[in-house]
Image (cartoon, helix red, strand yellow):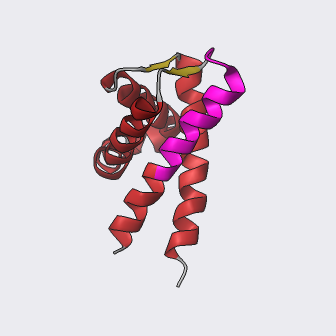
Amino acid sequence: MRHINRLIAYLIAGLLAVLISGFISQERLIGYDDRESVLVFALVLGAINAYIRPVIQLLTLPLSCLTFGLFSVVVNAALFGLAAWLVPGITVSVPGALVGAVISSVLSGVIFSILDER
């Protein structure tokens, strides 16, 4: 059940991150064509964050320790950019991937903490 809560948190956070970043920047950082592409992006980003990100963070753990955890921001931005690259209809610049990854990380943490309370 905990894994499903985490996946739901990643899906909602990815969806909100694209919408918030696109609204704030008016297509300078993140742009999207239609609602369907945003939903597909949220699904892809949620799957990447739930299944691929833990493996990559484990592999980059020594570098993350050397940089006091700052390299994890680079990993999150790269995975955000990867999800945008995989989904047609979503355009993300490098600063947009960084902003979107930070917003997505904060929102997924908040949502997961709300869903995980018993």
Q: In the rendered image, is residue 70 in sight?
A: no
Where residue 40 sits, quadrant-wise, is top left
Of residues 109 and 27, the one nearer the viewer is 27
Range of the magenta residues?
12-28
Residue 38 is situated, as x and y percent measured from the top left of the image, at: 45, 34
On screen, residue 49 versus residue 74, left or right, reads left
Q: Residue at x 57, y 39 (%)?
A: 17
Is residue 27 in the magenta section?
yes
Residue 41 is situated, as x and y percent measured from the top left of the image, at: 39, 35
Q: Residue at x 67, y 19 (%)?
A: 26
Q: Is residue 105 above or below residue 94?
A: below
In this figure, what is the number of numbered marks?
0
Of residues 43 and 68, the one nearer the viewer is 43
Of residues 23 and 14, the one nearer the viewer is 23
Question: What secondary structure predominates along the stretch shown in magenta?
Answer: helix
Residue 1 is situated, as x and y percent measured from the top left of the image, at: 34, 75
Residue 77 is situated, as x and y percent measured from the top left of the image, at: 49, 31
Q: Residue at x 61, y 60 (%)?
A: 110
Q: Is residue 115 above or below residue 100?
A: below
Q: Residue at x 42, y 41 (%)?
A: 42
Q: In the rendered image, is residue 94 in sight?
A: yes
Q: Residue furthest bottom?
A: 118
Q: Is residue 64 above or below residue 54?
A: above
On screen, residue 50 versus residue 67, left or right, reads left
